[in-house]
Image (cartoon, rainbow, N blue to C red):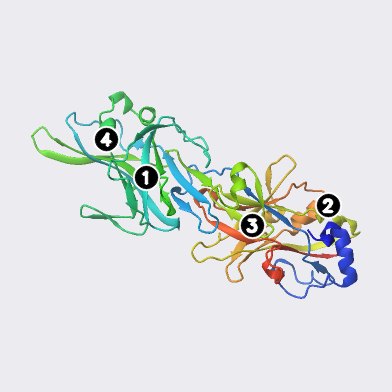
Amino acid sequence: MNSLKRLGLFSFIATLLLLGACKRPESDFGSELLPDGDLLGATQTDTITIIPTVIADDSVRTSNLSSAMLGKFTDPVLGNTIQASIYTQFRLSTTAPTFPVDAVVDSVVLSLLYTGDYYGKQNIQSFGVFELTESLFIDSVYYSNHRKATSFQNRIKPGFESYNMRPQDIVLIGTDSVLPQLRLKLDESLGYQLIQAPSTALASNDDFLQFFKGLYIKPSNSNNGGIFNFDLIDAESKLAVYYHYNDDSGELVETRYDYQINSECSYFSEMVHSRAGTALQPLDLGGEVSGDILSYVQAGGGMRTKIDLPFIQDFNNFENRSINRVQLILPFDDDNRFEAQGSLFLVYKDDEGEFRLLPDQAFGTISGTGDFTSDHYIFNISLYIQRLLNGEINSQGLYLVSRNSGVSVNRSILHGPNYSTEDSSENMRMILTFSY
């Protein structure tokens, strides 16, 4: 930090006033958030000290959301490797089903319907499928760092571990066309386990969930392609056992039974992040990384950015000052391959360590939507700063987080306050307009 900033904000502003550095607003940048006339007689500064710090995100809720994530992806810029796995229950599609004692299992297929959303690239990925030995509960909340006990036996059919990930391709099943889906072929032994279950295990769904707790779908360690989203409660997402038998007249009957994933099932995504060998490695050890040059916000339980304003209270040294407008400007890198997040969320942490919404959020003025023409996010935080200075809010810092963290792994690369020494418009900054 330079010597002026070490003087503190009050001394800094006093110096700027003498030098004429504080100025009347000369542009209408963001003025749509301020009523007409409020800029008249006001003073504006964009030299407030901002200290951003990148920290690992706390675990995020991933249970029973609009989609679940599966796959493995290594960010070509950050080097951060993300692995997404799925835990899910299954329920009976009919009440107390019965199966012929001489039924022969032909195949077992776990179908997961693509939503069409993915992050990374479409390529061949390999998977393992393991039976849960620990129950899930529909009334429980599960987070991205939760793990459940599983068996060691991989239920993928040998020779069918790898699949070409194609979230836009219609799938042919015989002569029928179905929506794009990942169809994992499982070993026939699982099919026999299910259709030969004792009648007591099939009497109700509660009984069945005690007998068969669900499956864990995990990408192979060798994968490096993309993270794909799946709609688990669509009827196309299911575990199907295909089998045949001879009926009482000796005729061959070929059929199947579906074990459903529906809104009464519990499911969630487990997310594992590895930043070994990168500048972000300290995050894996509970540390933090300076965001002075570049800062990051990543969904999927990845990263968030903390923003400290160490000298903001020095504004209270101005008598009769009034805050007209405060904007936090966050330029970001726009990469056509890995587009920045469409919007970010800004919260503050109170004295008890709880995250709180800014008052500007309640009034609908905070924004945070990405502008992909000028490549920046703008947050209007006037009410937050005013109440902070008035002592109505006790804050331990602002936090930039992802809006869709439970169903995405998208990231935004933000420019820090010292990103550019030549063009300050490329830097993270706060524009504060006040009068006194």
Residue at mark 4:
191
User: Label 3's element?
Assistant: strand
Residue 147: image tag:
none
Q: Earlier in the sequence, mark 4 or mark 3?
A: 4
Q: Position of residue 328 (x, y in %)?
A: 70, 61
Do residues under tags 1 and 2 come within 8 Å of each other at their CB atoms? no
Badge 2 density bin: few <14, some 14–19, many ≥20, Cα 10 Å: few
Q: Residue furthest bottom?
A: 26
- What's the distance in space between the residues labelled 1 and 2, CA to CA? 56 Å
Do residues under tags 4 and 3 come within 8 Å of each other at their CB atoms? no
Q: Nearer the viewer, mark 4 or mark 3?
A: 3
- What's the distance in space between the residues labelled 1 and 4, CA to CA? 19 Å
- What's the distance in space between the residues labelled 4 and 3, CA to CA? 49 Å
Q: Position of residue 90 (x, y in %)?
A: 37, 37
Q: Is residue 57 visible?
A: no
Residue 390: image tag:
2
Do residues under tags 3 and 1 come within 8 Å of each other at their CB atoms? no
Q: Nearer the viewer, mark 2 or mark 4?
A: 4
Between 263 and 350, the one lying in front of the other is 350
Q: Position of residue 269 (x, y in %)?
A: 47, 43
Q: Nearer the viewer, mark 1 or mark 2?
A: 1
Residue 127: image tag:
1
Give the answer, above or below, for where 175 lies relative to 377: above
Q: Nearer the viewer, mark 1 or mark 4?
A: 1
Where residue 186 sits, quadrant-wise, is: top left
Residue at mark 3:
295
Is 274 placed left or right of 295 in the picture?
left
- What's the distance in space between the residues labelled 3 and 1, CA to CA? 33 Å
Residue kind at label 3, given as amino acid type? Ser
Residue kind at label 1, given as amino acid type? Phe
Q: Residue furthest front?
A: 277
Q: Earlier in the sequence, mark 1 or mark 4?
A: 1
